[in-house]
């Protein structure tokens, strides 16, 4: 159970980091400036909401593939 939770948190974190780097290329050059802008604007949750949305979409496709694989292996 703990192993599954750690795996899913790892997937979420990877999605979060990838989305942050794709949407904000300046994170590689000057991350402190980006974090200061985020703090002054007060938009702390939007990266997590974007990542959650993508994580749920990816999770939906993972469930479909898992179901198809179970159906295929049952025959």
Image (cartoon, rainbow, N blue to C red):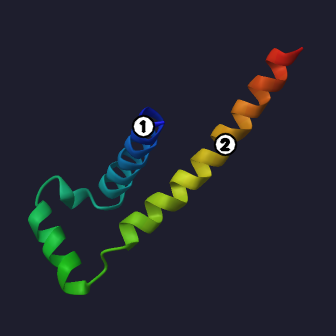
- Splitting the image into 4 quarters, where does residue 36 fall? bottom left
Q: Mark 1 near mark 2, Cβ–Cβ under 8 Å?
A: no
How far from the left and from the top, in percent, is residue 53?
Answer: 54, 61
Above or below for 39 versus 13:
below
Q: Residue at x 49, y 60 (%)?
A: 52
Query: Left or right of 24: which side holds 40?
Result: left
Q: Quadrant of the C terminus?
A: top right
- Mark 2 nearby-residue class (10 Å; few <14, some 14–19, many ≥20): few
Left/right placement of residue 36 relative to residue 49 reads left
**Looking at the picture, does residue 50 appear above or below residue 57?**
below
Q: Which residue appears farthest toward the front when viewing the image?
A: 1
Judging by the rendered image, the residue that carries numbered circle 2 is 61
Determine the secondary structure under disc 1: helix
User: Which sits in the foreground, 67 or 47?
Assistant: 67
Which residue is under mark 1? 2
48 up-or-down from 67: above or below: below
75 to the left or right of 9: right
Q: Horizontal and vertical percent for residue 23?
A: 35, 60
Identify which residue, 22 or 68, lies in the foreground.
68
Q: CA distance from mark 1 to mark 2?
A: 23 Å
Q: Quadrant of residue 27?
A: bottom left
Expressed as whole percent of the image width and height from the top left, the position of residue 61 reads: 66, 42
For the point 44% across and 58% down, which residue is it? 51
Residue 28 x %, y %: 17, 52
């Amino acid at each position: 159970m703990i192993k599954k939770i750690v795996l899913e948190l790892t997937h979420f974190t990877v999605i979060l980091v990838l989305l942050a780097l794709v949407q904000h290329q300046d994170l590689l050059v000057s991350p402190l400036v980006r974090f200061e802008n985020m703090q002054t604007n007060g938009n702390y949750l939007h990266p997590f909401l974007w990542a959650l949305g993508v994580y749920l979409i990816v999770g939906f496709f993972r469930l479909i593939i898992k179901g198809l694989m179970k159906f295929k292996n049952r025959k």
